[in-house]
Image (tube, rainbow, N blue to C red):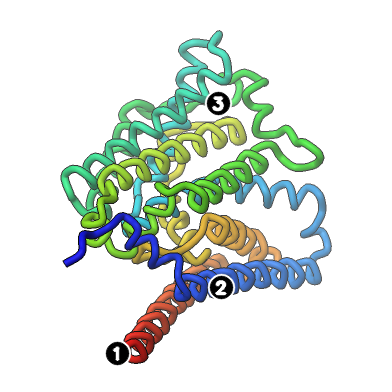
């Protein structure tokens, strides 16, 4: 028996089947982009004001937080895990930022923003340690920490609320300033997407996340530090949730213990609709970002089209089912192609 090498799982993502999967992912991402264009065109035909500069700004700002969270969720999901606590981490980080400004008015804005990101990273480290070290299923761990982090937020807030008047204008300006007509938070989200996509594509540790999600046991036997990679994915995901909390505080200025409630399912939906396989091993942050923009646009377009809010949730649910169906179809086709290759090689 030959000794396993660290290349084996990676080769699963580098051969002909991988090229086929990559082409299908690109087709799916183009499909999402086409659906987005058609939705915007139909909504604009009904109400030309939908494409006004103010509406575009609102759309970009609305998609910003979901995009950042979807990128972090993608890093976790491709390792065959999930993080349901991101909404609570966002809320906790946002309230921590507001509290720091109230308690220490002289603190520089970058220091407070960094504190919010670090708090999110600590929450992610708690999740990662429980999943990677204690080997507890991510669904169970993050469902529990969803309530733990939210409970800490409620205890900390104690029914109080932080308003925009309690925060410096320079910080609030972060959520309202534009560069060449593009809101700064949207530029930050774009930077996060590009950086994460570059990391997953260019770094060995990034490609190993796909190998872990494709076949964890084979990845472990091949010498990939599976636990360390999963722990790192959760930490980065938590840090991005903290960053989203900082941007939420800068944009809205009003903070209480309910911030981010119910956001976790929308984040998972954005990643899945964007082509990230819920069973791990496949998907890109670009697709997840497109999924986030599509869901945000649906939320903005349906009221303009005078569609009941109930149907908005139904449309999102339908998109998730279609995305999972396509993943299943891809898996069946890949398995059939492998069987064909084995028969020819026999």
Residue at coordinates 37% horizontally, 45% vertically from top-left? 233
In the image, taking residue 112 as reference, residue 328 lies left or right, namely left
Task: Indicate which label's residue lies in the foreground, 1 or 3.
Answer: 1
In the image, taking residue 53 as reference, residue 214 lies left or right, namely left
| Residue at which label 1 appears | 346
Residue at coordinates 27% horizontally, 46% vertically from top-left? 225
Q: Is residue 318 visible?
A: no
- Residue sitting nearer the eye, 223 or 291: 223
Cα distance, mark 3 to mark 2? 48 Å
Rendered image quadrant of residue 28? bottom right
- Residue sitting nearer the eye, 107 or 91: 107
Bin the neighbour count of mark 1 within 10 Å (Cα to Cα): few under 14, some 14-19, many 20 and up. few
| Residue at which label 3 appears | 163
In the image, taking residue 152 as reference, residue 202 lies left or right, namely right
Q: Earlier in the sequence, mark 3 or mark 2?
A: 2
x then y, percent, for residue 20 = 51, 76
Residue at coordinates 32% horizontally, 91% vertically from top-left? 343
Bin the neighbour count of mark 3 within 10 Å (Cα to Cα): few under 14, some 14-19, many 20 and up. some
| Residue at which label 2 appears | 23
x then y, percent, for residue 315 = 53, 72
Circles 1 and 3, Cβ within 8 Å, touching? The answer is no
Which of the image's four quarters has the C terminus?
A: bottom left
Bin the neighbour count of mark 2 within 10 Å (Cα to Cα): few under 14, some 14-19, many 20 and up. few
Q: Earlier in the sequence, mark 1 or mark 3?
A: 3
- Residue sitting nearer the eye, 304 or 110: 110
- Examine the rendered structure and indicate whether residue 227 appears above or below residue 37: above
Circles 1 and 2, Cβ within 8 Å, touching? The answer is no
Q: Secondary structure at mark 2?
A: helix
Cα distance, mark 1 to mark 3? 70 Å
């Amino acid at each position: 028996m030959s000794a396993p090498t660290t290349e084996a799982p990676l080769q699963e993502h580098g051969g002909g089947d991988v090229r086929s999967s990559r082409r299908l992912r690109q087709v799916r991402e183009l499909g999402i982009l086409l659906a987005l264009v058609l939705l915007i065109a139909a909504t604009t035909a009904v109400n030309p004001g939908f494409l006004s500069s103010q509406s575009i700004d609102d759309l970009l700002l609305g998609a910003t937080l979901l995009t950042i969270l979807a990128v972090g969720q993608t890093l976790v999901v491709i390792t065959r895990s999930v993080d349901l606590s991101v909404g609570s981490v966002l809320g906790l980080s946002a309230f921590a930022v507001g509290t720091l400004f109230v308690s220490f008015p002289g603190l520089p804005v970058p220091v407070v923003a960094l504190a919010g990101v670090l708090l999110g990273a600590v929450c992610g480290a708690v999740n990662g340690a429980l999943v990677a070290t204690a080997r507890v299923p991510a669904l169970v761990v993050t469902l529990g920490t969803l309530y733990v982090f939210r409970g800490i937020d409620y205890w900390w807030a104690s029914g109080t609320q932080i308003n925009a008047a309690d925060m410096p204008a320079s910080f609030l300006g972060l959520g309202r300033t534009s560069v060449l007509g593009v809101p700064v938070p949207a530029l930050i989200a774009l930077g996060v997407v590009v950086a994460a996509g570059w990391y997953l594509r260019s770094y060995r540790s990034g490609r190993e996340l796909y190998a872990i999600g494709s076949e964890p046991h084979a990845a472990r036997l091949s010498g990939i530090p599976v636990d360390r990679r999963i722990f790192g994915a959760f930490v980065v995901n938590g840090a991005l949730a903290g960053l989203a909390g900082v941007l939420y505080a800068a944009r809205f200025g009003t903070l209480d213990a309910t911030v981010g409630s119910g956001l976790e399912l929308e984040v998972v939906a954005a990643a899945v609709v964007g082509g990230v396989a819920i069973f791990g091993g496949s998907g890109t942050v670009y697709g997840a970002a497109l999924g986030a923009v599509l869901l945000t646009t649906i939320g903005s377009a349906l009221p303009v089209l005078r569609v009941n809010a109930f149907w908005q949730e139904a449309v999102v649910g339908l998109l998730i089912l279609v995305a999972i169906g396509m993943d299943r179809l891809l898996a069946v086709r890949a398995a059939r192609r492998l069987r064909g290759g084995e028969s020819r090689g026999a």
